[in-house]
Image (cartoon, grey):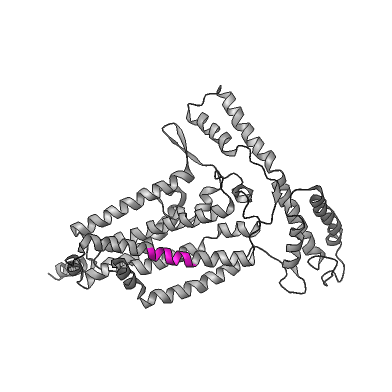
Amino acid sequence: MLIRYELSKIFCRRVLWIAFAAFLLINAFQLTQATPYHGKSDPNYNYYAGRRLMYSKVEGPFTNEKIDFVLDGWDTTYPSIMSPQEGQQIPNDKYYTKTPYDDFAVYDELKEEMQRQYEYNDSIKALKGYAQENLAYMCGLTDTYEGRRNQLILDTYGERTIHSFYDQTGLGAYLKYDFSSLLVLLLLLLGISPIISSEKEAGMAPLLASSRFGRHKTIAAKIGAMALFTAFFAACFFLMDFLYYMVVAEFHGAGSALYTLIDFKYTPLTCTIWQYILLQWLAKWLGMIAVGLFFVLLSSIFRETYPVFVLGTGLIALFMAVGERFRLFNPISMLTFSEQAQELSTFNFFGYPVLTIVSLPISILLLVLVLVLLIFLMNHKQWHVSVTGLWNRKRGKAHE
């Protein structure tokens, strides 16, 4: 009941819904600019349908027939693009995309990607070979950091192999799209900045503290409302991004292992792409919760809302500027979770290699706990700063 009341206070702000509508339009425009496929959009050329048809002929388990289809097509169209003639741009039904140039571009793309996936098994064997050589050089010692790290490489990559090929261009582009997360943070800033400071401005804080719910239950309700507020807007943008890429780019091979994606070929995660999408959503939500708690803390410190908004904007900029340097305690690193999951990154913890991708959510959870405790402490002690009061006091001394 109390959380519902706090949510209603947040959602009743008209400026929030105006910003939400504007951000949806901005995100829609950005999504159209991030479309992973390029080619002639004129329906006479049939580029997208032709590309999809060419990919459908080779998707699935690797076979000699599929490899021959790509190599023969590449050899056939190559002379046409090397000796341009008048009328080459006229649509021709003998080509999948209606022109030899676009057909060759797709064949070349297929050739490169199929070769990469086909040779993935050899690259993993080479990587494990280096780890085994390092262990042999250290005489098999596994009680040191480097020894344990090389053993971790062997255990993580195990018997990884790729036996099938799919058009995963859309999946790769979707997992790298992070623009909407910034828009959610800005909505958080608009919605959460006044969550406590506005009550101090209106003189309602003492009355709410003396209510039957008490100060602590009220603060807990505000934190809960912030989490639900974040979940709602994050879900709106997550679903918008997901549905756009699923319809426009299509998700082929999403049931495959995550390491089949080119950007994740060395990932330490062993989940499927579908599972990783859910994991990424949860990671981003956790990062947004941490940023939202920073806004609640600022709202607890100041009696006015405008310094909360200004400092909150600066805080977002600071988190984005420091980036990887303090990623274990930087909530933004959870919003760029894909960058953290792409490679096997470890740090030395008393001689043991700890995966960054595992320690990152743990450290952010600890940060969330610390922020919650600080929020309760600030409101329990009723410590706050009035920027207006400080300014008036300074002006009064100047007049004296």
**Residue pictured at 79% horizontal, 59% vertical:** 104
Q: Position of residue 13 (x, y in %)?
A: 35, 75
Left or right of 302, for residue 341:
right
Point out the residue furthest to the front here: 1
- Is 230 one of the magenta-colored residues? yes
Left or right of 233, for residue 274:
right
Work out whether residue 46 or residue 397 is closer to the camera in this orientation and state it: 46
Rendering quarter of residue 94: bottom right
Left or right of 241, for residue 333:
left
**Residue pictured at 52% horizontal, 29% vertical:** 147
| 117 w.r.t. 44: above or below | above
Screen quadrant of the C terminus: bottom left
- Is 15 one of the magenta-colored residues? no
Screen quadrant of the N terminus: bottom left
In the rendered image, is residue 157 in sight?
A: yes
Work out whether residue 385 or residue 252 is closer to the camera in this orientation and state it: 252
| 306 w.r.t. 352: above or below | below
Q: Position of residue 308 (x, y in %)?
A: 31, 65
Q: Position of residue 76 (x, y in %)?
A: 86, 57
Task: Give the residues in magenta.
Answer: 228-236
Q: Position of residue 257 (x, y in %)?
A: 61, 48
Rendering quarter of residue 39: bottom right
In the rendered image, is residue 34 in sight?
A: no
Left or right of 327, for residue 221:
left
Prevailing secondary structure class for the magenta stretch in the rendered image: helix
**Residue pictured at 63% horizontal, 67% vertical:** 248
State the count of labels: 0
